[in-house]
Image (cartoon, rainbow, N blue to C red):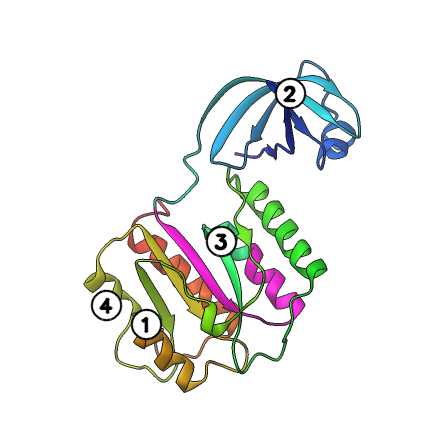
Amino acid sequence: MPGFFIDAWAGETAIIREDAKHIVKTMRKSVGDAITAFDGKGNVLSCTIKKADAAEVQLSVEESHKSDAEPNIAVTLYQGLVRREKMELIVQKAVELGASRIVPVLFSRCEVRELKPERLLRLNKIAREAAKQCGRAVIPQVLPAVPFKDALGEEEVIFTPYEAHRGYGLFTALEEHGKKGSYGIVIGPEGGMAPEEAEEIESRGGILVSLGKRILRTETAGMAVLAALLCHYREME
């Protein structure tokens, strides 16, 4: 369901600013027209435009309901920091597939060693646009980059594809660990994950898995695991 994210509230009035020009100039919406909006917290709002110009669109909310576009499991993608174009692609596709948040991670083999504030801002804008495009009512957050030692969170299960770990496949791991409420996916950078980093993940409860006989690029591996995870638990039907 296409729609627009609310930027602010004024009492019971929902306000859209970032997409106001597009709504008024491109879509040619005006006062009295119906429009769908998202509150960014998982709710879909059926609205009527009460005021509109290129700077701001004010909406009267007629009804709201929980979005059915959000997965029933929360998945955090811990992505090794990579070059700008690849990182932007990863964020876009992870949001489309259903990731809950993206955490850029500084591994020892990362060629890119810093995520500047302006780049982080752009990545979050890409996440917003991707969420809007695919009809999600929540905008997954891209967090500031963190060192590897500080990366892992409190997810119930953490999967880490590792090319040296043949013989224990992702689907076997999924079957053995059952459905949980939260998952982490840890993906190394372009240069791969150092053996000691893989060992550290395993020592902290992470599960090293194989993605088969082919070595996937960093921008492919996370999407493969995310899609497989959601498919396995019937979240893409």
- CA–CA distance in space, label 3 to label 4: 25 Å
Q: Residue 50's spot in the image, x, y percent?
A: 69, 15
Badge 3 or badge 4: first in the primary sequence: 3
Label 4 belongs to which residue? Answer: 172
Badge 3 or badge 2: first in the primary sequence: 2
**Rendered view: 90 above or below 44:** below
Residue 83 appears anywhere in the view: yes
Q: Residue 96's spot in the image, x, y percent?
A: 51, 50
Q: Quadrant of residue 227?
A: bottom left
Name the front one of labels 4 and 1: 1
Give me the residue at 32% from left, 76% from top. Answer: 202
Badge 1 or badge 3: first in the primary sequence: 3
Badge 4 or badge 2: first in the primary sequence: 2
- CA–CA distance in space, label 1 to label 3: 21 Å
Seen from the viewer's position, the closer of residues 177 and 22 is 177
Label 3 belongs to which residue? Answer: 101
Q: What residue type is labelled 4?
A: Thr
Label 2 belongs to which residue? Answer: 59
Q: What range is drawn magenta here?
A: 73-92
Q: Residue 144's spot in the image, x, y percent?
A: 58, 61
Q: Quarter holding the C terminus?
A: top left
Q: What residue type is labelled 2?
A: Leu
Give me the residue at 26% from left, 80% from top. Answer: 167
Q: How crowded is mark 4: few (under 14 residues within 10 Å), some or many (20 or more)?
A: few
- CA–CA distance in space, label 3 to label 2: 28 Å
Name the front one of labels 4 and 2: 2
Name the front one of labels 3 and 4: 3
* Local secondary structure at mark 4: helix
Q: What residue type is labelled 3?
A: Arg
Label 1 belongs to which residue? Answer: 204
Seen from the viewer's position, the closer of residues 222 and 213 is 222
Badge 1 or badge 2: first in the primary sequence: 2
